[in-house]
Amino acid sequence: MFDSLTKGFQNLFRRFSGDSKLSAENIQEALREVRMALLEADVNLQVIRDFLAKVKEKALGQEVLEGVNPGQMLVKIISDELTALMGGEAVPLVRADKPPTVILMAGLQGAGKTTTCGKLAARLLKDKRRVLLVAADLQRPAAVEQLKVLGASLGVSVHAEQGASPPEVCARAVERARREGFDTVILDTAGRLHVDDALMTEVADVARRTTPHEVLLVCDAMTGQDAVNSARAFDQRLPLTGVILTKLDGDARGGAAMSLRAVTGKPIKFIGTGEKSDRIEPFHPQRMAERILGMGDVVGLVERAQEVINADEAKAQAEKMFLGSFTLDDFLGMIDKVRSMGPLKDIMSMLPGMGGQLEGLDVDEKEFDRSRAMIQSMTAKERVTPEIINGSRRERIARGSGTKPEQVDELLRNFRGLKKQMQSMRKMGMLGGLMDPAKGLRKEKQRELERMQAMGVNPLDPQQVRAFRAHLDREERAKARKDRKRKR
């Protein structure tokens, strides 16, 4: 996601590592680089101009914290402005005071609207909502059948009629929802071109007859500025309340995500990051800004992990990590959990410092299967104490798993590296706060982590963490001195 843009920003920040402060000269040089990166990302030209002006205004004269280099301070400034550019805060779905909540889905042909209706329904089911999907796309052959198949796979009711117009189908579906106790109705309308006046009139009539609480435009992120232009055209005919960006996992540029809010004034409410029904997530501007800058999204990563790891499992894993008794059996369980969280490249992009290194990287998802086969070819003793695996054992494991001895060596190196990283996180006091699902992220750890990322501090770099905490100590002492003076 946005690999080339992330790489451009990270190359820029590394240039500042030898500078002692932010100056007019190096800021101007940085802005030229940022401008090129944003133009290549297909960001709206006026948005780029406004963004650069704000970054320049904030960067001039900015004090650099002790222990944090100018590049990291520039990360913080750009991160703040990117967050503001994309909306500042996440905007949740509206929920009607008196059910049902009606959500009208509109969009261009091929944007993935019907699939997104299913994904949204699946997400609402997790929130204990009773959802009714409405098949009002009567233009595309098999669209009604596609929605029925999606509904059946999710266990969601689908309202479909023959011989009626889309506005009539939608109006009757809303009445059915009131009668039968559905609290949410999702209207899947036909995909259209925004220049198709008849179909635009039809979807406007659907909105008039159903009075939806949300009118969401489904846009293909890979179309760049065309997605922004479509949103502007639809907003002239429909009272849009937000946008869902699909196919963001395949968008290497990011122009639509960075331009939509600024150009249209409409918030991005959800993003689609894959084909499966669970590959939809709320859009958080701050987290997206941090991912674009290569700072990762540790909070989002933990939230994903908590969706697939229950409290008891996570508590047991955390205890093993602290005690150093983490085994290859545990590693195998972790591999399975990570795989269920989504594509590996997407997960890697959520780790601090990884974003800019992923451009052009071919991540082999089959590596999961090879790792599983190798671990399952080991004896119970080898899984607990992999140190005993010598040359003959390595040959036997390779034969049993259909791999090579070198691949067995690589697996063991990865396992040792993971254990070492966990110990490093433990020493910094992070692991307990991140892996406590009974309480979610501990509030103090979450605040500290968010502030680290906002200031461009890599939470996995001990030196930067020490400098950050020393800065907080100085701030606290200065505040205490001011308080004492006031009391006098």
Image (tube, rainbow, N blue to C red):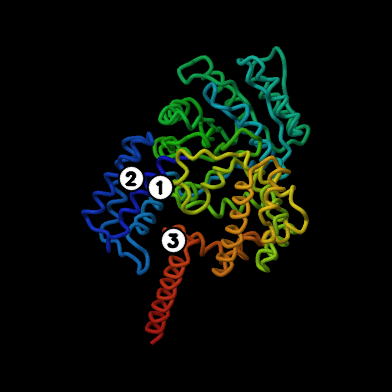
- Mark 3 vs mark 1: give the one in front: 3
The image position of residue 470, as x and y in percent, is: 43, 73
In this rendering, the answer to whether 13 lies above or below 365 is below
Residue shown at the point (43%, 65%) measured from the top left: 464
In this rendering, the answer to whether 377 lies above or below 225 is below
Mark 2: secondary structure? helix
The answer to whether the residues at label 1 and label 2 have Cβ atoms under 8 Å apart is: yes
Label ID, residue 82? 1
Residue shown at the point (42%, 79%) measured from the top left: 477
Question: Horizontally, is 486 left or right of 147 in the view?
Answer: left
408 or 133: nearer the eye?
408
The amino acid sitting under disc 1 is Leu
Q: Mark 3 and mark 1: span between their CA atoms?
A: 17 Å
Mark 3: secondary structure? loop
Residue 298, visible in the rendered structure: yes
Label ID, residue 420? none
Residue shown at the point (54%, 23%) measured from the top left: 110
Q: Which residue is mark 3?
A: 457
Neighbour class for label 2 at 10 Å: few (<14), some, many (≥20)? Answer: some
Residue 241, visible in the rendered structure: no
The amino acid sitting under disc 2 is Phe
Q: Mark 3 and mark 2: span between their CA atoms?
A: 23 Å
Q: Earlier in the sequence, mark 3 or mark 1?
A: 1
Q: Earlier in the sequence, mark 1 or mark 2?
A: 2
The amino acid sitting under disc 3 is Val
The image position of residue 196, as x and y in percent, is: 48, 16
Q: Which residue is mark 2?
A: 51
